[in-house]
Image (cartoon, rainbow, N blue to C red):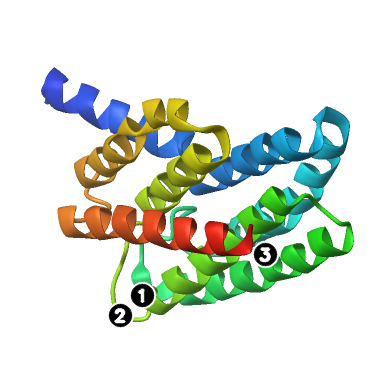
Amino acid sequence: MTRVPSTRSRGEHVAHVISEVLSPVYQVFFMLYAVGIHAAGLTRGLLLGTVASLFAGGIPYLILAAGVRRGRFTDMHLSRRDQRPVMLAVGLVSVSVGLAVVALLDAPRELFALVGAMVAGVAVALLISAFWKISIHTSVTAGSVTILVVVFGPWALLLSPLPAAVGWARVRLRAHSLAQVLVGAAVGAAVAYGAFVALL
């Protein structure tokens, strides 16, 4: 049996781990709980974070998983661009409902702005996916780090290598081109910052 060179195998393994650990849905959950607790305290923050997570991550994830099981989608990362618009549209509806729900629950402004930024991010990703395969991994990561800097201050800049790491991983796995990860990061950071600050 031919062995794959260890350096290549190791690199692909690291890239796979980065892609999975920093999957957009996990980042969504982390952000909603982190900002929710910061803005509303532990108990209420956990409650509001859970509600927001249901609409922003939980429901879309379950629908995507069901679609993968039934063969509607090829994988959980929506590797095929032509499969993205339908799932992104589902996500847009779900997170928009979540925005309305957190508003009805009188969520703190920071949490409301975060969910609003997620709505904007999904909407922009949906528009771009109509003609190009932008990297949602790097878009979400760059947007998350940007919002964390706004909410928690300069120390969050320590997380700034994460978008680069995710971008490297997506290119290393041949899931995206360099241009797709760079544009994803730039668009994600810009949309997240603009929407979040506008809604504060």
Q: Are marks 1 and 2 in contact (CB under 8 Å)?
A: yes
Who is closer to the viewer here, 80 or 139? 139
Residue linked to disc 1: 128
Q: To which residue does mark 3 refer?
A: 95
Label 3 secondary element: helix
| Residue 66 in sight | no
Near mark 3 (Cα within 10 A), the count class, few <14, some 14-19 or many ≥20, is: many
Q: Position of residue 148 (x, y in %)?
A: 52, 39
Quadrant of the rendering where the C terminus is positioned: bottom right
Which amino acid type is marked by label 1?
Ile
Q: Is residue 62 left or right of residue 181?
A: right
Q: CA distance from mark 3 to mark 1?
A: 18 Å
For label 2, the residue is 131
Identify the residue at image location x=71%, y=57%.
Answer: 112
Q: Quadrant of the N terminus?
A: top left
Which corner quadrant of the image does residue 92 belong to?
A: bottom right
Badge 2 amino acid: Phe
The alpha-carbon separation of the residues under discs 1 and 2 comes to 6 Å
